[in-house]
Amino acid sequence: MAKINDKILKIRNKGKERIEDDLLKYQMICTHTARRSFATNMFKRGVPTRVIMNITGHRTEKAFNSYIKISQDENAELLKEYFIKSA
């Protein structure tokens, strides 16, 4: 229904062996994907880090910061919005 049927090449290593799997994109979506997306989207909306960490169960900001995925451009935009609100 969501039309996420693109083929994706998933590469992983098992010991010294390289394993390549052709998967459909929707086959790669799991509960972890939802958790990571939730954390990233809430961070982008300006929800305080500590609030998100309480929901996701992260204990350290270092772990949390490596968990969310934002680009440099998105980070710059968030900083710009922060300074506009602070002015």
Image (cartoon, rainbow, N blue to C red):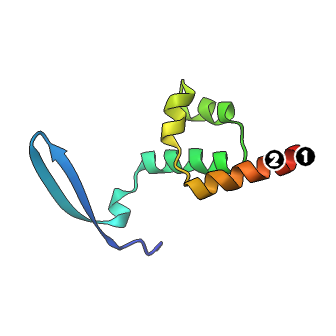
Tell me what residue is drawn at x 9 percent, y 42 percent. Answer: 16
Residue 1: x %, y % from top left = 46, 74
Query: Element type at marker 2?
Result: helix
Tell me what residue is drawn at x 72 percent, y 48 percent. Answer: 79
The residue under label 1 is which amino acid type? Ala
Query: Element type at marker 1?
Result: loop
Residue 86: x %, y % from top left = 87, 43
Residue 85: x %, y % from top left = 86, 48
Asked if the residue under mark 1 is in contact with the one under mark 2, i.e. CB atoms within 8 Å, the reply is: yes
The residue under label 2 is which amino acid type? Phe
Viewer-side residue, 42 vs 18: 18
Viewer-side residue, 62 vs 73: 73
How much space separates mark 2 and mark 1, taking CA atoms? 6 Å
Tell me what residue is drawn at x 50 percent, y 50 percent. Answer: 34
Judged left or right of residue 24, residue 80 is: right
Residue that badge 2 annotates = 83
Quarter of the image where one finds residue 24:
bottom left
Judged left or right of residue 47, residue 25 is: left
Residue that badge 1 annotates = 87
Q: Residue furthest left?
A: 17
Could you tell me how many numbered marks the image carries?
Answer: 2
Tell me what residue is drawn at x 50 percent, y 46 percent. Answer: 36
